[in-house]
Image: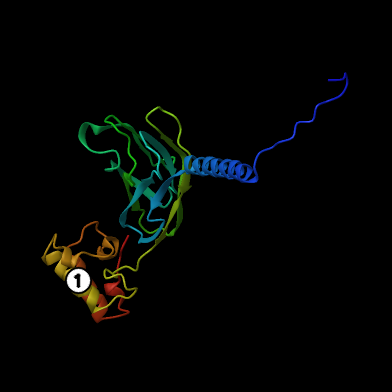
Amino acid sequence: MEKGVKKEVICKCRPAARTGLIMTAAIALALCVFAFVQSATAAQVSVVPAYQEVLAGQNFSIDVYIDPEGSEVFGAQYELHFNNSLLNATAQDKGPFFGSGSDSTVLKNEINNTMGWLKYGEVRTATPGITEPGVLATITFHAIDDIDGHSELKFTVVKLSDPNVNPIPVNISNGSVKVRTGVCGDVTGDGNVNMGDYSLLLNNVSYPGDPTYALKNEWAGDVTGDGSINMGDYSLLLNNVSYPGDPMYNLKCR
């Protein structure tokens, strides 16, 4: 070969072979992209229900719900904030997500109504990790009497980890609750005070503990304002309905 002369290399691949190579490369690339999308899918942590309306004085609950979305969850923790001028948190109970008994350990369970937050942490002690959705914890609130308004139920910290203690990507869905004050004497919750309320209150006192006669709003049933519901309340309510406008029978829910 003469000096300075480059030898040209010509591909003699058959057209069909070149096409096959291109298709193979394209399929491999598509599989890589698919695998990346699958591994990038984030788990979901939600407040359930996302929204509800309650009466002032009412107790209600929410769930902290986890959907692993294909991940294997071994540990979970959160911090949830709420409006402490409207709500008091009264309980934070372990849910079935990580299993029962010795299958898991609760590392943190704190309620601070002064600051308006709850903290919770739990880790799986059995194997394997959890891949099915479920309730991590159930929180019970009391809506403060005589105050209405709106409270967010907002996560400020959410962490999930896999069996190797690697963080799992998380999408968060916060919640909210609307608190409205009831009408004193309206134990049926229909917005009016009438004989239907008297009948329900009478049966509630006569058959204590019977769920058939449960009051929609217990605050509205204490019409004498003495802190308890008894025959004095249904007597006053009867007179209030029977003699509307008579100041002698004004209702006194506190």
Question: Residue 178: x, y in percent?
Answer: 42, 59
Give percent across and percent down for residue 113.
Answer: 39, 42
**The image quarter in which residue 176 lies:** bottom left
Quadrant in the rendering for residue 168: top left
Looking at numbered disc 1 in the image, what kind of residue is underneath it?
Leu
Residue holding disc 1: 200
Quarter of the figure that contains the C terminus: bottom left
Pick the residue in front: 161 or 69. 69
Front-lying residue, 19 or 142: 19
The N terminus lies in quadrant: top right
In the picture shown, does residue 193 fall above or below 142?
A: below
The residue located at (88%, 21%) in the rendering is: 4
- Is 87 above or below relative to 251? above
Percent of width and height locating residue 114: 41, 40
Q: Is residue 166 left or right of residue 127?
A: right
Image coordinates for residue 120, horizontal then vertical, percent: 36, 37
